[in-house]
Amino acid sequence: MEGIQNLKDKVLSVDDHLRVIIYGPAGGGKTTLAATFPKPFLFNFDKKLKSIYGMDVGYKDYSYDSPKDAAKSWKTFWKDFREMKRDDNEYETYVFDSLTSMDAMILCHCSVLAGNMADSKPDIGVYREQSDLYRHLFMEMNSIGHKNVVLIAHQEEVRDKPDDIGGIGGIREVTPLITGKKIRPKLPAMFEDVWYLTREMKAGAGDELTLWFKPHKRINASSVILRGKEGKIVSGDLSYNTIMKHAIKEI
């Protein structure tokens, strides 16, 4: 049979393209980390680019101020995304910031497709259409074989029910913040690596970033390229190069 290959001599290389989701709290360094990937282009939905001012990052803005604007922005983004996929351009990494804001765009777009107003309350048909569009989008992202794909999401805290009325339950799980209970568990399979990123201020020592890449207590994370490591990388200057050095066992 033609085309058979053997993986015994295959090792991870810095030339390999990654499929990554980075999620975590606001201000945790997600966009800054994504901007350190090789020659990035940013599809921006969040209006939060100040942290990477001065960096060599191409971008286009799709942020919106209303559900009606969101539905229109989705059409513009989809057209641009398909053109960027076909275009033999200089960029080596496509960054989508963020999935959480894109999520709202997709929902508004699906409401309009169903004949509703963009700001109307979604019904089960709209959510089903959104789920189908998600799958289509992720398949399109994964078919970009010649570039890195980085998807950024905010975090959602799943809490236990409080014991007393008005109380706040304890955190049971921390996951990427998106709509759709069926999509979220499939993200690790779709994107190979799901990283949870946090930032901690250290008095007199600058910020300390922690990248979790294995499930730990409440955190939903997984990694193909960092398999075999302890479960987290702690660094004051976290970047693509730092992570790849861990991945190819130079650290």
Image (cartoon, rainbow, N blue to C red):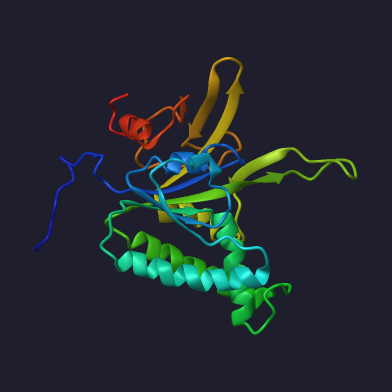
Q: Measuring 29% from the left and 28% from the top, which residue is drawn there? A: 249
Write the residue at 46% across / 70% down.
78
Q: Is residue 229 left or right of residue 49?
A: left
| Above or below, 154 relative to 68 | above
Q: Is residue 4 above or below residue 156?
A: below
Judge whether 37 appears above or below 88 on screen.
above
Residue extending furthest toward the bottom: 115
Residue 233 drawn at (x, y percent): 45, 28
- Residue drawn where x is 38% and y is 44% of the image: 56
For the question of whether residue 24 can be seen, the reply is yes
Given residues 116 and 139, the one toward you in this image is 116
Q: Is residue 110 left or right of residue 7?
A: right
Question: Which residue is rendered at x = 28% and y = 54% of the image?
Answer: 90
Q: Residue furthest top?
A: 204
As drawn, 242 above or below 163: above
Give the image location of residue 45, x and y in percent: 55, 57
Image quadrant containing the C terminus: top left
Identify the image quadrant of the N terminus. Answer: bottom left
